[in-house]
Amino acid sequence: MMFQSYALFPHMTVQENISFGLKQENLPQKQIAERVDEVLDLVQLRKYSDRKPEQLSGGQQQRVALARSLVKRPKLLLLDEPLGALDKKLREKTQFELVNIQERVGITFVFVTHDQEEAMTMSSRIGIMDEGQIRQIGKPHEIYEFPHSRFVAGFIGSMNMFEGVVVEDEPDHVVIESSESGCELYVTHAASMPVGSNVTVALRPEKVMISTTYNPKLSRNYTKGIVREIAYLGDISIYHVQLESGKIVQASLPNLLRLSERDVKWDDEVYLFWRPENGVVLSV
């Protein structure tokens, strides 16, 4: 196990910290030295082997803790929020380092984190837990694109959710009447839902498109509102659009143009639309 606090012995050097578990197993000194050298190279800490933990940065301490776990060659390594003590840039760098190390050593990592972005970056499979129960297990893109419940949909990333009632159920699509969305919601690739069922349609902000001009050819998955907020995040901008029902819808768009050059401004009346395959129908 690799602890969130790293739990390094402050009176021991890097080399002594890493070799501690092997010494408890009474392995031959030569074998201990070989295995310690191997993991020091793996985590790129050989030149720091004689330093104490207090002489290392947070990222270096994190790698010592990882090396101490890996040196015993476990079949399974549990990492309890191991990046929680690092700043944002170091976290991002260390995430990829951990993935590369995991691929090289071939050990199964069970990585516990509350950071959804971290989970998406590092995992080949994600398990979403709620009150001690696993709500969904799947690959990152499956969890993100096809959540099984409102909880999972709202937990991973941002999500727009529209309440409604099923008015049409066909093999290739369902139609939901939703007063709060201001339009009929047409969703393909949806599970069969009996007519009259109360459901929720979940829609990711990046799937929502914005236009300042009305398109008379569109009616389903097409609504209008007023831009109330624009959050500029550099690479993307997040638009908060208030519909006629009062509901706020988020739309995130890449900043292909400078903010001053874009058509959509605060308090503009805009039209929102999205493709039928972008919505997900949830009944639980």
Image: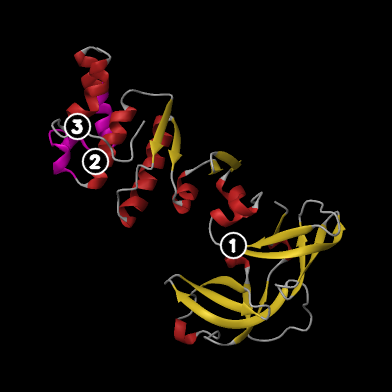
**Which residue is label 3 attached to?**
9
Q: Earlier in the sequence, mark 3 or mark 2?
A: 3
For label 1, count other residues whose C-alpha is less than 10 Å away and answer few (under 14), some (14-19) or many (20+): many
Please provide percent x and percent y for residue 189: 76, 55
Q: CA distance from mark 3 to mark 2?
A: 11 Å
Q: Are marks 3 and 2 in contact (CB under 8 Å)?
A: no
User: Could you say whether the residue bearing mark 1 is in a helix, strand or loop?
Assistant: loop
> Any mark on residue 159, and which?
1
In space, the residues marked 2 and 1 are separated at their CA atoms by 37 Å
Which residue is at 24% across, 21% downward?
A: 34
Badge nearest the viewer, 3 or 2: 3
Residue stretch in magenta: 35-56
What residue is disc 2 on?
Answer: 61
Q: Amino acid at mark 3?
A: Phe
Q: In the rendered view, would you say 280 is above or below 104? A: below
Kindly report the distance in space between the C-alpha atoms of the residues bearing marks 1 and 3: 44 Å
